[in-house]
Image (cartoon, coloured by chain):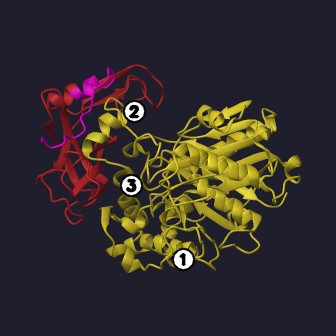
Chain colours: A red, B yellow
Amino acid sequence: MAEPARAKPKPTPETQHFWDGTQAGELRLQRCDACANVYFPPRPFCPGCGGRKVSVFKASGKGRLYSYVINHRPAAPGFTPPYAIAVVELDEGPRMMSNIIDCPQTPEALELDMKLEVAFEALDDKITLPLFRPTKG
Amino acid sequence: MRRNQVAVVGAAETTELGVIPNVSQIQLHADAALNAIADAGLKLSDIDGIATAVETPQQIAHYLGITPTWVDGTSVGGCSFMLHVRHAAAAIEAGLCKTVLITHAESGKSMIGKQPRFTAPDSLNGQFEQPFGVFGPPSMFPIPVLRYMKTHGITHEQIAMVAVVQREWAAKNPRATMKAPITVEDVLNSKMIAYPFRILQCCLVTDGGGALILTSADRARDFPNKPVYVLGTGESVETPMVSQMQTFDSSRAFRVAGPLAFKEAGIAHKDVDHLMIYDAFAHLPLYGLGDLGFMPHEETGKFIADGNTRPGGKLPLNTNGGGLSYMHSGMYGMYALQESVRQMRGIAPAQVQGAKISVCHGVGGMFAASGTIIFTNEK
């Protein structure tokens, strides 16, 4: 029997650009043309001012570890415990949930505020997830 | 809303609490409702307003045989019942109905007649949280706590004390699920669930329910039990995605709902005799103490660790034992309300002597929603 698979996102018209971005190796955010607010998750208007004129741009992919848990049980399908579920604060301001790769999943290794950079992991030929790893150097 | 215009005149939990494999979820609603109606000395036909969460008001009204002229299906998680109290008080004052029944029940442990929760893969949670391994509340609710601890200088031992103190209260409650004393060492050596939280810092999973009956204060003295007046109320929502909270060192929903209730009640924090803060996980009482303005967040851990909230302490908190030790069917808010009502009636197993004002603060989802009700037994 196949291993149960990790939950796979299904894009909507309003989020498609984000998932197209991860597949192209870009972390895409949106910025309000009127008030310059950068926000996430995607939507075609600014939750800061309500403006409908917004632009998609390529984010730096850099951020810091804002908080996390190391999940032991119950484990989600497709995950081997213990694994960290992290929230990353991007340099542009918004935060997003992700996982930290290339790093031991321990409290000692996962230091709050450590610098992170995005890494992309393809789930299949349609969906690529944005994960993060400690910044080298 | 004006103070003390509406009162709780009926309150009851299900006949059994804990593991109830022989009763379905909808029947647990009915059991709680019938107990509350009997407590109020009313008949089913006296009820003209109904509110419930997860199950729909039409489901519960029909099952009970009630024909309401006011319904509220607000379903924002475990604090839905605090919001129902607030909405019911406004509706009664506005003359939309006279006698409101609020029901909660959940077959959280036995899962009899309970629909499983499902996160659609094209929802925002499904796209931006689910793929990263969240799997139920224990993997989500504690996500902010490490940031809270770092910002405010809170220790693991202090948070462990939340569970220790609440077990002291639970020991005084015959209906509490867990009564055996525990120590900080026991908590910090218990099974790891989602670091930094271990099993003794996570709520129980049980079956049960509860119901409240509210009516106008001018009718309240005609009922068999001491009326408990609604002195102040507040509510808010923030986000269904824990990752998208404005900040992790405080809850915006708490900061809106709590102060609203205090302002409406016209009371100061020193006036509070009894406090309930919904504790699905051990960090919530700390967030509540800070966000409701009892003290700066930096002092919350020490305040609890120093014993101020334990039996005999100056601010009795979660006196039924809380979601950690009393019971937690999934949406615990109703049990917090029941304990506040018992304390205001003067009949709680761990009664706070002479208590006149009780603050009952609830959370829904993972800091997604909040409701605060302030009760008094003096008109």
Q: Is residue B261 above or below residue B308?
A: above
Report the disc number at residue B168: 1
For badge 1, the amino acid type reads: Glu
Image coords of residue A62 (percent x, y):
22, 43
Disc 3 element: loop
Residue at the extreme front of the image, as rendered: B22
Residue drawn at point x = 85 percent, y = 51 percent: B220
Q: Would you name the residue on which mark 2 appears?
A: A37
From mark 2 to mark 3, how far is it between C-alphas? 24 Å
Left or right relative to B233: residue B229: right
Q: What residue span does the magenta drawing correspond to?
A: A1-19
Report whether residue B269 is seen: yes
Image coords of residue B274 (percent x, y):
67, 66
Same chain for mark 2 and mark 3? The answer is no
Q: Would you name the residue on which mark 3 appears?
A: B144
From mark 2 to mark 1, how far is it between C-alphas? 49 Å
Left or right relative to B234: residue B25: left
Image coords of residue B335 (percent x, y):
59, 57
Q: Is residue B292 above or below residue A35?
A: below
Residue drawn at point x = 63 percent, y = 45 percent: B30
Asked if marks 3 and 1 touch (Cβ < 8 Å), the reply is: no
